Structure formats: C-alpha cells, structure tokens
Amino acid sequence: MVKNIIFDFDGVLVDSEALIAKSFSEYLAKKNIVFTEKQFYEYAGKKTVQIVSELSTIYNISDSQIFYEDILKISNQLYENDLKPIKGAKEFLEKTNHNRYIGSNNIHRKIINGLKKIKFNDYFNQSSIYSFDLIQKPKPLPDIFLKPFEQENIKKNETIIIEDSLVGVKAGVAAGVRVIVITAGSHWHSERSTQEFYEAGVFEVVNSFTEMLKLINKL
C-alpha cells in the first residue's frame, strides 16, 4: 500500500517547464540563435545554472554569468505572471490523503511562493519540502529523495515518487524508490518518446492525474 508520495515540483505540481523553455528560447533568439522550446526539454529537470553552462559551451556564449542572470530575470517574471498548476493536480490532492513531500531541484523559497500562487500551500507542510538549496546535491544524485527517509518515519516500499524528467527518474531509481512519470504538463508534446524513462528504470508512465490515482490505488 502506498502511504507516502514525494512530488517533484516543476512539471509535476506547477506547469513551469514550458515557462522556463520559453525564457531560454526568447533569450537566445535575441542573440540570433535558434533554440526551440522543444529543444529545451532535453535539459528538463537540470539546475538552471547547469543548463546555462552547457548552452554557453554549445553556442559559444562568452559570459555565462550574464546569461544566467538574464535567464533568471525572464523566467522569474514569467513564473510570477503565468504560473498555473498542472491539470488535474488539485483534484488528485483533494482525493488523496497520503503523507506528502516535495523533492525538487528548485530552491525552497521559490517552491513556497509557487505553492502559494497556485493555492496549493495548504496541501504541503513547509518542513516536508526538500529542495536543492537545503540538500546541496541536485538530481540525478539521489540525495534530495533520500532525505525524507532520513528525517521522517517512512518506508521506501510504502512510497512512490512522481516525476516528469529523466534527471528525476534517475535520482529516484538511485534512491531505491518506485518512480512514476506523469506527462500532463504543457511541455509534453505528442512526438516526445517515453522510452528513455523505461530504460532508466521507471515503474510506470501515466498521462494524467486520473491515471495516476487509478494506478496508486492498485499498488
């Protein structure tokens, strides 16, 4: 029986991956670099600073610090104005009573603000949010997902992780916890394959929180 759920944040609870993709696409377009939002999803789940570093190398952008700072300004503005919950997430939270945790490569303050913005803050205790700035070891390392087991009286065989990225799947599998990928975010497109998740050891991939609820009730 599933008693505990560890949610990723971006792309699982909040529909933010598309906003981040848009910020990179728009910024690079100003430098006459064609970088589509679909291309961004190869980097989904990674820390922004990691993505900036990789793209700076690929596109010969000399000042990666300015690149990083500009991306943060653009993405934070989009985040503030356009952030919405993933479709079906609220209904899922209302219909379930599992112990809830968040394990995210995002930072604690931004997660708290995001939960408040989409009115999800009543569903999560702030002490149950495990973020990069608190753990210091980002996914695909498993530390963010291992921390709840160190601090809470929960068991891995009674826990699932809900993810949307390959980076997150690798972290969850390395932590020894069943990982379910959800593809309900607007950053998913029809031609995007889920095969990489199965190759990485995902337990299952579902398309909606309705499917997620049915699957969890069977476990």
Image (cartoon, grey):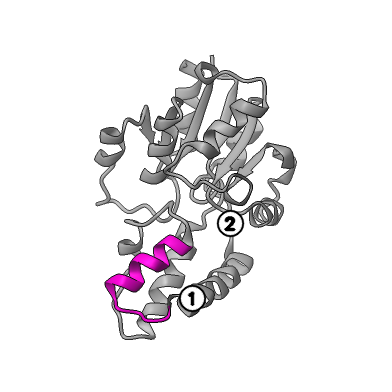
Residue 60 sits inside the magenta stretch:
yes
Q: Which residues are magenta?
A: 49-63
Rendering quarter of residue 3 = top right
Q: Main secondary structure of the magenta part?
A: helix
In the rendering, at what x and y percent does residue 34 appear? 28, 77
Q: Residue sitting at 45 percent across and 24 percent down?
A: 215
In the image, 102 versus 138, the foreground residue is 138
Q: Residues within 10 Å of mark 1 (few under 14, many from 20)?
A: some
Whether residue 123 sits left or right of residue 87 in the image: it is: right
Quick one: label 1 or label 2, which is nearer the N terminus? 1
In the image, 205 versus 214, the foreground residue is 205
Which residue lies under the disc numbered 1?
65
Query: Residue farthest to the top?
Result: 1
In the rendering, at what x and y percent does residue 96 appear? 62, 27
Rendering quarter of residue 83 = bottom right
In the image, 22 versus 147, the foreground residue is 147
In the rendering, at what x and y percent does residue 217 appear? 51, 19
Whether residue 87 sits left or right of residue 27 in the image: it is: right
| Residue 207 visible in rendering | no
Q: Is residue 91 above or below residue 79?
A: above
Q: Residues within 10 Å of mark 2 (few under 14, many from 20)?
A: some
Residue 123 sits inside the magenta stretch:
no
Amino acid at pointer 2:
Lys
Q: Is residue 99 above or below residue 164?
A: above
Which residue lies under the disc numbered 2?
84
In the rendering, at what x and y percent does residue 18 appear? 45, 61
| Residue 54 visible in rendering | yes
Amino acid at pointer 1:
Gln
Q: Residue sitting at 32 percent across and 54 percent down?
A: 189
Q: CA distance from mark 1 to mark 2?
A: 29 Å
